[in-house]
Amino acid sequence: MIYHKTDEEIELIRQSCLLVSKTLAHVASILKPGITGTEIDKQAEAFIRDHEGAVPGFKGYNNFPSTLCVSKNEVVVHGIPNDIPFTETDIVSVDCGVFWNDFFGDAAYTFAFNGVGEEVHKLLSVTRASLYKGIEKAIPGNRIGDIGHAVQEIAEKENGFGIVRELVGHGLGRNLHEAPEVPNYGSRGRGTKLQEGLVIAIEPMVNMGTKRVAQLDDGWTISTRDKKQSAHYEHTIAVKSDGPDILSTHEYLETAIKNNNYLSEIQ
Ligand code: MG
Ligand code: MG
């Protein structure tokens, strides 16, 4: 069952998404070689709880143990923060959710430290571009397949990267995961028709090599099978009569990256 949101509900989701966006910017401001996933997770949780009534959206969800998913290098998504320090050649995907005023917000970004090579930078750049290509298709009358098709076109067809099939974007609102599923692959004109008030998280997960993934023994971490790098960018958007309304923003964190000498910008 798909629940279409009222304008008032969309504004509450926007507030949750903006807090997610600011939390990711805080993370971008403290990332440096030597800091650990555990430390950024602790700071993200404190940042969220500084806002009255706001709580981390992932912590405790199906018993997930932390505020952030921290997924390094070959980890695609759902990495659990740990005490291994980041190094200057790492890429780090940070996924954050917030629950505030009865509504969730969800967004993610893959950061690159200064020592990351050109090939991996291209993966990040193409994956981020694929997110915006998908968002462009989120207009009333289009279908879910139009979004996935647009993501697939640039990531797979034009650039030869592998799109993860097992994990997909999703509706969200009062629940973190609602119908419909939003795959990052698909056929034009197929799937659920998009209507005004639909709120979905679009989140391409794109691998340098094979699209195949495996789940680690911790029951959460999803890794590429070939251990090559993977990227993940996510926005929560609302389908409006005049086009997609992006409720989260990467602007704050991209400003923080510019001001952080240890991180390099995604082109
Ligand atoms: Mg997310
Ligand atoms: Mg999501």
Image (tube, helix red, strand yellow):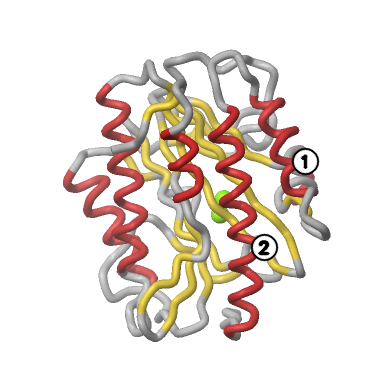
Q: In the rendered view, would you say 246 is above or below 75?
A: below
The C terminus lies in quadrant:
top left
Work out which quarter of the rendered image holds the N terminus and state it.
bottom right
Residue 223 at what x, y percent from top left? Answer: 51, 31
Q: Where, by quadrant of the figure, is residue 208 drawn?
A: top left
Question: Badge 2 is on which residue?
Answer: 104
Q: Are marks 1 and 2 in contact (CB under 8 Å)?
A: no
**Callout 1, which amino acid?**
Ala
Image coordinates of residue 42 in percent, x first then y, are 75, 33
Residues 141 and 163: in front is: 141
Q: Nearer the viewer, mark 1 or mark 2?
A: 1
Q: Secondary structure at mark 1?
A: helix
Give the residue displayed 28% in from the left and 53% down from the top: 152
Residue, far left: 158
What residue is shown at x 45% (from left), y 59% (from top)?
202
In the image, is residue 12 above or below residue 250? below
Amino acid beneath label 2: Phe
Q: Which residue is mark 1?
A: 46
> Dot 2: few (<14), some (14–19), or many (≥20) neighbours within 10 Å?
many
Is the residue 78 above or below the residue 203 in the image?
above
